[in-house]
Amino acid sequence: AINCKIARPSEDFFMNFNQFNPTALMKRALELGEEWAEADAVASMLEDTKKTLLASITNEFLGQGRNKTTAETMALASKEYLDHIKQLGEARKDKNKTNVKYQTYKVWVGLIQTKEANQRAEMRMGGSTT
């Protein structure tokens, strides 16, 4: 069984909005990107092995003298195959969740950059409205 559970974001998932630290922002973006890549790899591996597993289980039933249609139907209903499909569903869900976290963080960084640019523009104009 492959463990592909993704932890909920901690309270420090996003840095304090008033702290602009490009190094820390990039480090966090890299971490989130790597979490997404790992979750994507798990889901892809499970997807890639789905047909191979089905064929293997089908062959076991064929070896017991079943015809092809019956053997495939039994393979599709087997606990081993159903467990694989369940793991695949969980992996896809986790992949999507990690992608949402990564994309949300990228948007958040963009908002911080906009805020910083606006503050610099305000300072150049000699006033501050934030």
Image (cartoon, grey):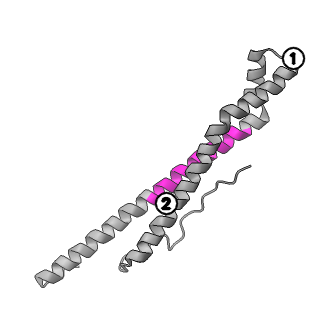
* Residue 12 numbered tag: none
Neighbor class of circle 2 (other Cα within 10 Å; few <14, some 14-19, many 20+) is: some
The residue shown at (72%, 30%) is 54
Residue 88: x %, y % from top left: 64, 42
Residue type (three-letter) at the residue carrying disc 2:
Gly
Magenta stretch, main secondary structure, is helix
Residue hosting label 2: 33
Q: Which residues are magenta?
A: 83-102
The residue shown at (14%, 82%) is 124
Count of marks, rendered view: 2
Q: Secondary structure at mark 2?
A: helix
Q: Secondary structure at mark 1?
A: loop
Q: Which quarter of the rendering shows the C terminus?
A: bottom left
Residue 55: x %, y % from top left: 73, 28
- Left or right of 19 in this view: 31: right
Calculate the distance from the C-alpha at mark 2 to the C-alpha at mark 1: 49 Å
- Left or right of 101 in this view: 46: right
- The disc, 2 or 1, on the residue closer to the chain's N-terminal end is 2
The residue shown at (80%, 14%) is 67
Say if 63 sits above or below 78 in the image: above
Residue 99: x %, y % from top left: 48, 54
Say if 123 sits above or below 98 in the image: below
Toward which corner of the image does residue 25 lie, by quadrant? bottom left
Disc 2 to disc 1: CB gap under 8 Å? no
Whether 95 is among the magenta residues is yes
Whether 101 is among the magenta residues is yes
The residue shown at (30%, 70%) is 113
Asked whether residue 77 appears in the rendered view, the answer is: no
Residue occupying the far left of the picture: 125
Residue type (three-letter) at the residue carrying disc 1:
Gly
Neighbor class of circle 1 (other Cα within 10 Å; few <14, some 14-19, many 20+) is: few
Residue hosting label 1: 65
